[in-house]
Amino acid sequence: MELLVNSLIKAHSKEDEIRHCTRGCKMRYDNYFELSMTGTSSPAKGAKYCLRRGFTLVEVLIVVVIISIAALMAVPMFSSAGSMQIRSAGNIIAADLEYAKNMAITTGQNYSVIFDVTAESYRIEDQSGNVVSHPVKKGFDYVVDFRSDSRLNRVDITSVQFDPGAGNAITFDCLGSPYSGTDPLNSGSITISADGTTATIRVEPVTGYISIN
């Protein structure tokens, strides 16, 4: 009879321990009861017992899905860095060409944008050939250098073509009309590239209309 009672007490204690441990709780048993999970002797009396709770299949799947989503978001960010810089550089070049044209119209003097394909840069000069001051960066000349700008350092100026001639400069007169040297512009384009992505900024003759393709 006593053996049966002890067995029932041990079984009840074991069931109670499992119930509480699955809720994340730790239990302390009295020195009067011992736990035997595999038939071997239990650890020292009075120690803390708790069954380790493993991960369920649902939890593992959730983690896998979260990691997959994060990876899918990260890959396009890295792969599109070049295309993002191309768009930014194209917009900057177009805006600077527009700025030179507006300055020519406003002041009634010629303004030129001169490109340096080797140095991946360009500058804006006035009628006297002096580099103009940057309107935003006070105290700096209006020189744009892609290599020194971490936001645009992937961008290369692939080619500059202003027809007629083979010059690397475009000039706007007081009416905003573009010239290649001293001749009216027939066609003008600046091609840039980064990580296999290319863009072309075009300047139309007569009107000086600027577009990005």
Image (cartoon, grey):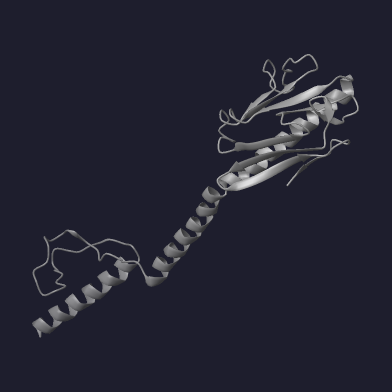
Q: Image quadrant of residue 136? A: top right
- Give the x, y percent position of residue 29: 20, 64
Residue drawn where x is 10% and y is 75% of the image: 39
Q: Is 161 or 78 nearer to us in this picture? A: 161
Q: Is 130 or 164 nearer to us in this picture? A: 164
**What residue occupies the far bottom of the structure in this picture?**
1
Residue drawn where x is 31% and y is 62% of the image: 25
Q: How many badges with numbers are in the image? A: 0
Residue drawn where x is 42% and y is 70% of the image: 58
Whether residue 85 is visible to the viewer of this picture, yes or no, is no
Whether residue 139 is visible to the viewer of this picture, yes or no, is yes
Q: Is residue 74 above or below residue 3?
A: above
Q: Is residue 28 above or below residue 202?
A: below
- Give the x, y percent position of residue 122: 67, 27
Q: Is residue 37 above or below residue 25?
A: below
Q: Is 133 or 43 nearer to us in this picture? A: 133
Q: Is residue 207 left or right of residue 13?
A: right
Q: Image quadrant of residue 172? A: top right
**What residue occupies the far front of the structure in this picture?**
165
Q: Is 71 or 128 nearer to us in this picture? A: 128
Q: Image quadrant of residue 42? A: bottom left
In the picture, which quadrant includes the N terminus?
A: bottom left
- Give the x, y percent position of residue 165: 75, 31
